[in-house]
Amino acid sequence: MKRIQTLVACLVLTGAGLAALAAMPLAAQAATVETRMTERGTILVNEAGFTLYMFTSDKKHRDHCVTVEKCTTFWPPLTTMGMPTVGMGLKSKWVSTIMLPGGEKQVTFKKKPLYTYIGDSMPGQTSYIGAFAFGGYWYGLSAKGKPIK
């Protein structure tokens, strides 16, 4: 009887663990950098099709937004648990990660840290490209890593 109770308890715990893993945000599990045609041309997007941004106050491989109060609340870093993947037409050698102060890995493209924006409500939205906030401009990126203003 004890063995059956133990087995049932393990199955319940395993199921709860899988449900918790499935509930994790997609960006926290894995990240994919892709391209999408928009009204501003072809830009980088995440796996859900949302615009990825670069911050002009960042340095190569260094996130400045994390040092500015509330910046990451509005411009969350694109994070990943492992190595990010790339969509067709992008070179995987251009995608890498940097370590954030809290231990998360932020995805970079051609040495530029990548972010999303909480104000984007649908895939492919570009109305916040060129916004000035937290001491710098937020631009989209082309498939070659050039800022889209």
Image: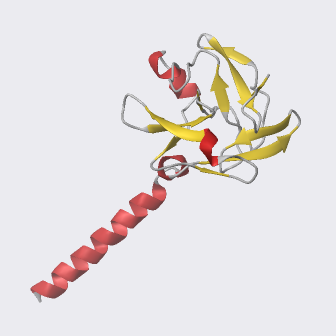
Name the side, left or right, on which 98 lies relative to 17.
Answer: right
Which colour scheme appears in the figure?
Answer: secondary structure
Name the side, left or right, on which 118 lies relative to 23.
Answer: right
Q: Position of residue 83 (x, y in %)?
A: 50, 49
Q: Say which quadrant the N terminus sits in.
A: bottom left
Q: Nearer the viewer, residue 146 or 139?
A: 146
Compared with 91, 113 (above or below) is above
Residue at point 56%, 23% (across, down): 60
Q: Position of residue 29 (x, y in %)?
A: 48, 52
Q: Nearer the viewer, residue 43 or 132?
A: 43
Q: Say which quadrant the C terminus sits in.
A: top right
Name the side, left or right, on which 39 lies relative to 123.
Answer: right
Q: Position of residue 84 (x, y in %)?
A: 55, 48
Compared with 27, 113 (above or below) is above
Residue at point 46%, 50% (across, down): 82
Q: Position of residue 62 (x, y in %)?
A: 50, 23
Tell me where residue 21 sits by quadrant.
Answer: bottom left
Q: How many marks?
A: 0
Tell me where residue 52 sits by quadrant.
Answer: top right
Q: Nearer the viewer, residue 13 or 43?
A: 43
Q: Residue furthest left?
A: 2
Name the side, left or right, on which 54 lies relative to 39.
Answer: left
